[in-house]
Amino acid sequence: MAPLSWRHHTLLQALLTRGPLSDRDFHALFTAVSGKNPATHQQLFNETLLKINKDLAYLQFELRACINQYDGMVYYGVVNNISDEESKLGTKYSVAQIAFYKGLLEAIVQEAGNDGRITSIDAINVRLDNQVIIVDGSQDSQSRLPTSIKNFSFSQKEKTLEELIRDRWLSSTSTGKIGLGTRSFLDLRSWFRANDIPSCVVCNEACIKASSCPNEGCNVRIHDYCLKKKISQRKASRACPGCSTEWPCQDDEADGDDDVDEPGEDQAPSANRSSRKKRKRVKAELVEENDNAGPSTAVPRRTSRSTKAEAVEAAKDASAAGASQATRTSKRRKK
């Protein structure tokens, strides 16, 4: 098998140094190194990723794509396919920080609502002792917790939370809510399946942020972007795949309907034509009303024209008379 070229190395180096890249940025990078646009050269793009993954398989790594469930965007990144004690030695996080992240992860995926986020206060109050397994299971296990776990303070939690958000294992909103980050969606696919996290009936990926069936007795969940894509098709049924309950409209669907009524920039010409047609129609109606009004309305218009013509003729006559008078005066002076 031929070795990876500098183009493959460039793509890998970018993902390893910058972290996960959005599909727009990764496609732009691919275009820069290959001179081909993935949109028009999809086969070449797929073959390139396949070539990279064949070489990475020896190291148990994979170049993978995922969807960030909060913004619906596709991201690419390099992930470790195996989680063992040896691979854990490569992390920069301490045992206490990893336990804190695990506690946050469980709190987020077990969130009762469909938002897939927890408040920053709930995040700080996550307990770490539940994430440490004591082998003998004795009643005195609490006292045998590592010192780093027992002494992990609120200030350390806040600092770790900021670090996890900066490294994109977690994400935060302007309102202070904490959710999973892009790297979690990339790396934790197998963890989601192993822990029986409900999956989307459309894409079969774990549902962290998703919509539930309006029927409380139904467990069907669908990602917001999957639901939008599914019901955007005109002939697609809005019935729940599990219980056939009618799925309610989303907020952006209603907004989209309103947008249809409002003409956009590309609709301006047709809107202008409609406006001109309307003005012509009104003008025609006014003319018809004038014609139906009888002679009394039309006569003043003709009288006005004739009065103007008479005024012009009078001005010409006055000018000619003035010129004639001036000629006779000049002749008398010569005599």
Image (cartoon, rainbow, N blue to C red):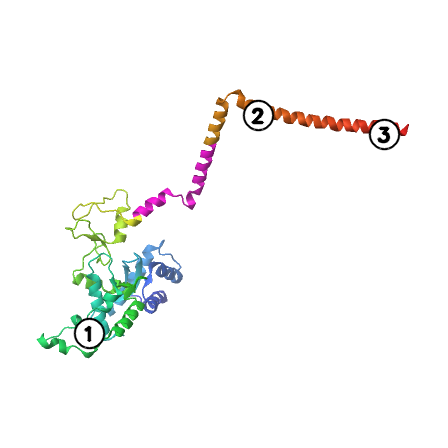
Magenta-highlighted residues = 253-280
Residue 220 in sight: yes
Q: Is residue 196 above or below residue 130?
A: above
Quadrant containing the C terminus is: top right
Q: Main secondary structure of the magenta part?
A: helix
Q: What residue sits right under mark 2 in the picture?
A: 301
Task: Give the amino acid at mark 1.
Answer: Glu
Q: Find residue 90 and report its horizontal and vertical position in percent.
A: 25, 74
Quadrant containing the N terminus is: bottom left
Q: Mark 1 and mark 2: span between their CA atoms?
A: 101 Å
Q: What residue sits right under mark 1 in the picture?
A: 85
Relative depth, front residue between 23 and 286? 286
Task: Give the amino acid at mark 2.
Answer: Arg
In the rendered structure, does residue 268 fall within the stretch colored magenta?
yes
Q: Find residue 302 and report its horizontal and vertical position in percent.
A: 59, 24
Relative depth, front residue between 158 and 70? 158
Instruction: Pick whichever of labels 3 and 2 is earlier in the sequence.
Output: 2
Residue 52 in sight: no
Task: Give the amino acid at mark 3.
Answer: Ser
In the rendered structure, does residue 259 fall within the stretch colored magenta?
yes
Relative depth, front residue between 30 and 305? 305
Q: Find residue 184 and report its horizontal and vertical position in percent.
A: 25, 64
Please give left or right for residue 302 compared with residue 50 in the image.
Answer: right
Q: What residue sits right under mark 3 in the picture?
A: 330
Helix, strand or loop at label 1? It is helix
